[in-house]
Image: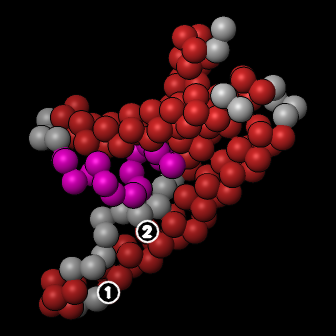
Amino acid sequence: MNTLPLAFISAASAMIIGQCWKVISPVFRGKPPIIRNALQSGGMPSSHTAAAASLALTAGFREGFNSSVFAVALVLTAVIAHDAVRVRGSINTIINILRKVAPQEILDEEDTLPETIGHSVKEVTAGFVLAGIVAAVFRVFFIL
């Protein structure tokens, strides 16, 4: 049962790295870091996807890729990635439409539309890449 804490640490690491990237990435475009991005959903990369995929990969490395633990984590990852693109990504589209058609006074009064909540396929793919990197590091340094 000692595999779950390591897989959890791998998942948490992937999520933290993903969220930190969202804070510092504007610096590479000549802008200041955006601290509020640390707690927001959406954006590049999908840290939820990164966490779930890192959990699955680390569990697979520890328990084997034919184990029930890996299978459960893989299904969870698929659900999270699908939700990020199809469900929450659709919400982004609706928010953008609302910003174009709603009167500015209503948008200013309400101030309830988030900047982003979902992900593009590219952002979810970046989450998978981040997960692969984190899981590979955990495999090299912690799974001997």
Relative vertical location of residue 143 with respect to residue 66 in this rendering, above or below: above
Residue 92 numbered tag: 2
The reply to whether the magenta stretch includes residue 37 is yes
Q: Which residue matches tag 1?
A: 101
State left or right for residue 27 relative to residue 124: left
Q: Looking at the image, which residue is at 33% across and 37% down? A: 21
Q: Badge 2: few (under 14), some or many (20 or more) residues near its Cα, within 10 Å?
A: many
Q: Residues within 10 Å of mark 1 (few under 14, many from 20)?
A: few
Amino acid residing under circle 2 = Asn
Q: Is residue 111 left or right of residue 2?
A: left
Residue at left 24%, top 36%?
Answer: 24
Q: Position of residue 90 (x, y in %)?
A: 52, 70
**Secondary element at image label 1:** helix
What x and y, as percent, mark residue 109? 16, 88
Which residue is pictured at 36% across the width and 43% down the height? Answer: 19
Magenta segment? 34-48
Question: Residue 67: x, y in percent?
Answer: 84, 34
The answer to which image quadrant residue 4 occupies is top right
Q: State the residue in front, 50 or 31.
A: 50
Q: Is residue 70 above or below residue 83?
A: above
* Residue that appears at 41% across and 56% down: 42
Q: Is residue 112 visible?
A: yes
* For residue 65, side relative to residue 117 (left or right): right
Using the rendered view, name the quadrant where residue 20 is placed.
top left
Q: Amino acid at mark 1?
A: Val
Residue 2: give its label: none
